[in-house]
Amino acid sequence: MRIALNRIGFLIGLVLFASACTPQVNVVAPKEPITINLNVKIEHEIRVKVDKELDNVFSEDKGLF
């Protein structure tokens, strides 16, 4: 009977010890809002200028070669 109580006590202690070591994860919303800064500068003017210059070169009567 004493051995059975020791086993039960050991098992209860083991379960308490194992439950105390489980990791705890908390999901908390941030206090400040999330800000996303998109500093994007789009330059398409260069390509348009080159395309216009190429059109002028190909439209000349002299030809390329």
Image (cartoon, rainbow, N blue to C red):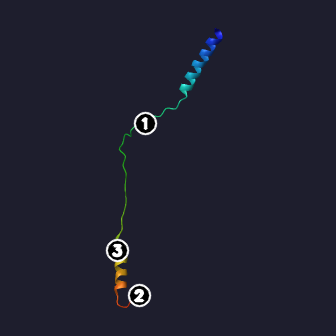
Q: Report x, y in % for residue 53.
A: 36, 80
Of residues 33 and 49, which is closer to you in this image? Answer: 49
Q: Quadrant of residue 51?
A: bottom left
Q: Report x, y in % for residue 45.
A: 34, 72
For marks 3 and 1 on the same chain, the one whose residue lies earlier in the sequence = 1
Residue at left 60%, top 15%? Answer: 8
Residues at circles 3 and 2 in contact by the CB criterion of under 8 Å:
no
Task: Tell me, for residue 48, which label it has, or none.
Answer: 3
For marks 1 and 2 on the same chain, the one whose residue lies earlier in the sequence = 1
Which amino acid type corresponds to the residue marked 3 in the rendered image? Val
Residue 32, relative to residue 7: is it above or below?
A: below
The N terminus appears in which quarter of the rendering?
top right
Q: Residue furthest bottom?
A: 62
Identify residue for label 2: 64
How far apart are the alpha carbons under marks 3 and 2?
Answer: 21 Å
Q: Is residue 64 left or right of residue 5?
A: left
Q: Report x, y in % for residue 60.
A: 35, 88
Q: Quadrant of residue 63?
A: bottom left
Packing grade of label 3 (10 A; few <14, some 14-19, many >=20) is few
Of residues 12 and 44, which is closer to you in this image? Answer: 12
Which amino acid type corresponds to the residue marked 2 in the rendered image? Leu
Task: Tell me, for residue 27, which label it has, or none.
Answer: 1
